[in-house]
Amino acid sequence: MTVDRQTAAPEQADIVIVGGGMVGVTLGLCLAQQLPQRRVVLLEQATLPAVQPGQPLPYAATFDARNTALSRRTIQAFTDLGLWQRLQPHATPIRHIHVSDRGHFGFARLNAEDEQVESFGQVIENAWLGVVLLAALRDCPSVSVRDGVSVTGLTREPERITVRGRQGDAELVIQAPLLIAADGTGSPCRDWLGLGARRHDYTQTALVTTVATSLPHAQVAYERFSAQGPIALLPLPDLPGEPVQTRRSLVWALPPADAERMMALDDAAFLQALQTAFGGRAGRFRRVGRRQAWPLQLMVADQQVVPRAVVLGNAAHSLHPVAGQGFNLCLRDILVLVQELVAADAAGQDPGDLSLLRRYEQMRLEDQRQIIRFSDTLVRGFSTSNPLLAVLRNAGLVGFDLLPGAKPALARYAMGLSHV
Ligand SMILES: Cc1cc2nc3c(=O)[nH]c(=O)nc-3n(C[C@H](O)[C@H](O)[C@H](O)COP(=O)(O)OP(=O)(O)OC[C@H]3O[C@@H](n4cnc5c(N)ncnc54)[C@H](O)[C@@H]3O)c2cc1C
């Protein structure tokens, strides 16, 4: 294909990344560290926060108001990138996990000490994660970050892929042997590449906010299931002037109409409704921050690679956040993809070659399938009012608490160490 309406020659790169979310930015950092000789261009449609060299990083909401539970494997990856020291001041370890079922007898507890680990993972605010990753990426000479660029189309040829985009009134055309599409669940690139996807609408909306409780969180992560949907309460770092260990991240999955109603309540009525739904384990819910709503669906791309292109991150698989696995799974995909690209580079192989990309996909399918099945079963198994299923799942939770070997297996999933 030739590029019509284009007088200037298309820009050339080695790899083009579409999407500057957590996955695109982390991928850019890994490529810069391991393939610094390759020129990478990252295109993001939103305006990313400006970070001034030499200035302290702004600690304010940037990407979004969510928090992410980072598994131990993910923390190791950020340590290897030399970034964990910068991330840690705004992260809180999870040392205990408590799973329960509202209105039923079963519950399960996991302790990091019993599993002989220091913690199951750490909770970090996306705002801080985003700004640290982005600042580091902007310091990488081999990666050019272009924000405010909306990608509008792709054309694949045997030797290269052409990416077209718009930045204001200007048109931009870049060619590379490989495109990595990390453009989110609704991925336009996935469509342009002709890749289908299977979807399941959970008919749940995640209501996400920060709350303060009367009892300290004591580094416990709570997962409470109910027929309406799960409630996750994760420990957050302290804020100056606030009572210690009382900030928590709330992810409350609800039927969409209920979520809409909860979004519209005033703070006092919301806190009361939350108290009723969650019970008294965290003490009294005292304060609530800004509320955000995220519709929840399972989306899995039928195929993740074609000649010259890979879909990655939420563009490849988008999960219910119940088990805090989405980003952790994407991170493991990134590590294997980069490892394969490094090996191909050393062997002088074309990075967009289908056999290489297929090998990457094959290496990742088993871990992806297990995590997708795990989180999907959790949601479907618990989000039901069927009394027989309620008895079975409670027997499961009690058994799980008593059964030797069951807990370490789940703890390994929670830590993201199951199939690395
Ligand atoms: C409520 C909630 C809680 C979660 N908690 C956890 C957790 O605790 N642990 C965990 O591991 N995971 C968690 N996740 C999952 C995690 O947030 C996602 O896996 C992760 O954000 C995926 O990032 P991404 O970069 O693939 O996608 P996105 O964040 O969607 O980024 C895609 C980017 O592509 C850009 N883009 C789209 N189209 C174009 C275009 N045409 N041109 C240019 N740019 C484009 C978008 O602007 C966007 O910035 C949670 C998810 C939710 C919803």
Image (cartoon, helix red, strand yellow):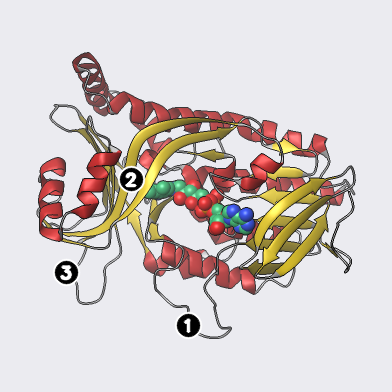
Q: Is residue 67 above or below residue 86?
A: above
Residue 15 point in image, percent of width and height: 77, 56
Q: Residue furthest front?
A: 5
Front residue of this view, candidates 92 and 124: 124
Residue drawn at x 38%, y 67% is: 90
356 relative position to 416: left or right: right
Classify mark 2 as within 8 Å of ligand 1 or not, answering yes or no. Answer: yes
Q: Disc 3 versus disc 1: distance between alpha carbons?
A: 26 Å
Q: Quick check: 54 left or right of 212? A: right
In the image as oriented, which residue stretches furthest toward the bottom? 54
> Against 116, is 398 above or below?
above
List the residue tagged with mark 2: 206
Mark 3 Cα within 10 Å, few/some/many (few <14, many 20+)?
A: some
Give the residue at x 88% y 47%: 347
Q: CA distance from mark 2 to mark 3?
A: 27 Å
On the image, the x and y values in percent for residue 141 come to 73, 73
Q: Is residue 85 visible?
A: no
Residue type at numbered disc 3: Pro
Q: Is residue 91 visible?
A: yes
Depth order, front residue of 212/237 = 212
Assess mark 3: CB under 8 A from ligand 1?
A: no
**Disc 1 within 8 angstroms of ligand 1 (CB):** no
Which numbered disc, 3 or 1, marks the residue that appears first in the sequence?
1
Q: Which residue is mark 3?
A: 243
Which amino acid, mark 1?
A: Pro
Residue plotted at (49% across, 64% down): 130
